[in-house]
Amino acid sequence: MTGAQHFLDLDDAQRPALEALIVRAHAFKKGVPDAGVRLRGRTIVGMFFEPSTRTANSFAVAAQQLGAHWLAFDTGGSSMSKGESIEDTARTIAAIGADAIVVRHQESGFPHALARHFNGAVINAGDGWHAHPTQGVLDAMTLVEELGSLEGRRLVIAGDIRHSRVARSSARAMWLLGARVTLCAPPLLLTLSAPGWGFADLATDLDKCLPTADALMLLRIQKERVDASELPPFEDLTGGYGLTLARMAKLPPHAVIMHPGPVNRGLEIDDSLVTHARSRIERQVQNGVYARMAVLERCLRPLERAAAGRA
Ligand code: ASP
């Protein structure tokens, strides 16, 4: 298919393009009359090599809301498990008529490699430690909905920064919109490599960060990317930043709590706070559908939306 656009990361994203996606996501949330036919006749393949509840299902719903066919590729039962290369898999998926692939993989850069061989749109649904760009869009959308402009607002992201692709993409999205971002973690879970993080402040004491935060986003320890034998027991780590009622009281009254999920209750966030009035965790999931509708439309109808001055 010609004219498709990939959506691989937010590394080179520009503020107007991100703002336009958020405006469009809000429009989908309010109701776009022809939403159900925007991608009529298109086929979108979901390839999830890592587990996913929120991302896979919200992409499937987003595709269906736009009138597209969603085909869940069985990664375990595919010929990749028989040694088929990325290149041949991409060609095969193109040959069956797919217009886009939504891909999640444990290797950083896998979606980029797939994009080199697929003649349609490739959308990154999370690659290793690297990026989760639609999470960045939905988190920014949720915070814009909450605070209006993000200019000068302070977002604190606390938890396993080092192994988190969400931290990378969401921090970048909020920063692009003018927010000040603080990444907070015990030293063992803080990023070791500065490149790409120059825009954010680093902190190790969450209690000091809370009084000036407009939003606090918590992250679980990314157990699948961590060698647990190199870390102290997880409870010892999360004790220093896990959100409790006492810690929440240090936030300004307007500040909200976010988490990309899945939540590890009792570790990075107290059980009672997950559905607290100040939690926007379910709102993030709900907004994920609209943010992904905006991304799918952008990738599959880029020229038309640009020409209409709406992209
Ligand atoms: N669901 C997010 C991700 O896929 C966050 C997480 O798994 O902790 O990266």
Image (cartoon, rainbow, N blue to C red):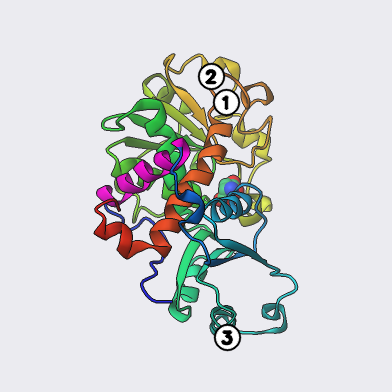
Q: Quadrant of the N terminus?
A: bottom left
Tell me the residue that label 2 is attached to: 247
N-terminal-most mark, 2 or 3 = 3
Rendered residue at 68%/84% (across/down):
83
Residue 235: image location, x then y, percent: 67, 34
Rendered residue at 61%/56% (across/down):
225
Q: Are marks 2 and 3 in contact (CB under 8 Å)?
A: no
The label nearer to you, 3 versus 1, is 3
Instruction: Confirm if mark 2 falls within 8 A of ligand 1.
Output: no
Q: Crowding near pointer 1: few (<14 within 10 Å), some, many (20+)?
A: many
Residue 17 falls within the magenta-colored stretch: yes
State left or right for residue 118 relative to residue 240.
left
The label nearer to you, 2 versus 3, is 3
Identity, as a three-letter code, of the amino acid under mark 3: Asp
- State whether residue 184 is above or below residue 243: below
Q: Crowding near pointer 2: few (<14 within 10 Å), some, many (20+)?
A: some
Q: Which residues are magenta?
A: 15-30
N-terminal-most mark, 3 or 1 = 3
Q: How far apart in space, not on screen, are marks 2 and 3 (Cα)? A: 52 Å
Residue 85: image location, x then y, percent: 59, 84
Identity, as a three-letter code, of the amino acid under mark 1: Leu
The quarter of the picture where residue 174 lies is top left
Residue 297: image location, x then y, percent: 43, 57
Mark 1 secondary-structure assignment:
loop
Identity, as a three-letter code, of the amino acid under mark 2: Arg
Residue 88 shows which numbered tag? 3
Q: Crowding near pointer 3: few (<14 within 10 Å), some, many (20+)?
A: some
